[in-house]
Amino acid sequence: MLSKFRPTWMVESIFRVSPQFLLDNNINCVLTDLDNTLVPWNSKRGSEELRAWLHETKKYGIEVIVVSNNSHRRIKAAVQDYELPFVPRAMKPLTIGIRHALKQFNLNRKKTVMIGDQLLTDVLAANSCHVKSILVKPLVNNDAWNTKFNRWLEKIIWNKLIKKYPNLHWE
Ligand SMILES: [Mg+2]
């Protein structure tokens, strides 16, 4: 059961996930969480850092698709400047949103990675779909009310994870 929460990789921030790293691992598509992964949960817009990262990934032919539990309206407002495709109401940790993205965009799941800031939603959903995952640290240190419970549970799982997989480390 614990293995379902184990991310393939852990990187401090999505902006440190380089196109070269992805290509070296035979990945051509990034599914990414929105809140606290791409933009702070309480922010309406992305950053220059996001713009630069998207520019780089595009340059190397890597597709980026937002797969978020948030609403169509929220995601659209946050990413409209970047012309990013997205799947709203993804219902992570259920696999619905990721499966929808794989099908709609005709993706090869072996060449796809899910990036997100939560073990309990992003990583669990990715593992349940047999999609690789990258856990990142949240962009800001607080969360929306509906994430606070997850964070509490996440701490417990995290402590068990690092005991079982001492090799897990932040890149
Ligand atoms: Mg998030």
Image (cartoon, rainbow, N blue to C red):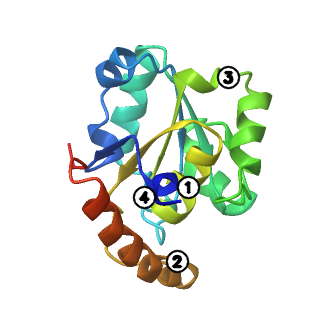
In the rendered image, is residue 33 in sight?
yes
Residue position marked by numbered label 2 in the rendering: 147
Question: Which element is circle 3 on?
Answer: loop
Residue at 38% over, 23% down:
22
Q: Earlier in the sequence, mark 3 or mark 4?
A: 3
Q: Nearer the viewer, residue 102 or 13?
A: 102
Looking at the picture, how far across and down is residue 40, in whole percent? 42, 64
C-alpha distance separating marks 3 and 1: 19 Å
Secondary structure at badge 4 equals: loop
Q: Earlier in the sequence, mark 2 or mark 4?
A: 4
Task: Name the quadrant of the C terminus.
Answer: top left
Tag 1: residue type?
Leu
Q: What residue do we see at 73% from left, 26% from top? A: 105
- Which residue is under mark 1? 124
Q: Is mark 4 within 8 Å of ligand 1?
A: yes
> Circle 4: is it few (<14), some (14-19), or many (20+) Cα within 10 Å?
many
Which residue carries the number 4 mark? 117
Q: Is mark 2 within 8 Å of ligand 1?
A: yes
Q: Which circle's residue, 4 or 1, is located before the other in the chain?
A: 4
Is the residue 20 above or below the residue 43 in the image?
above
Residue 80, horizontal then vertical, whole percent: 61, 45
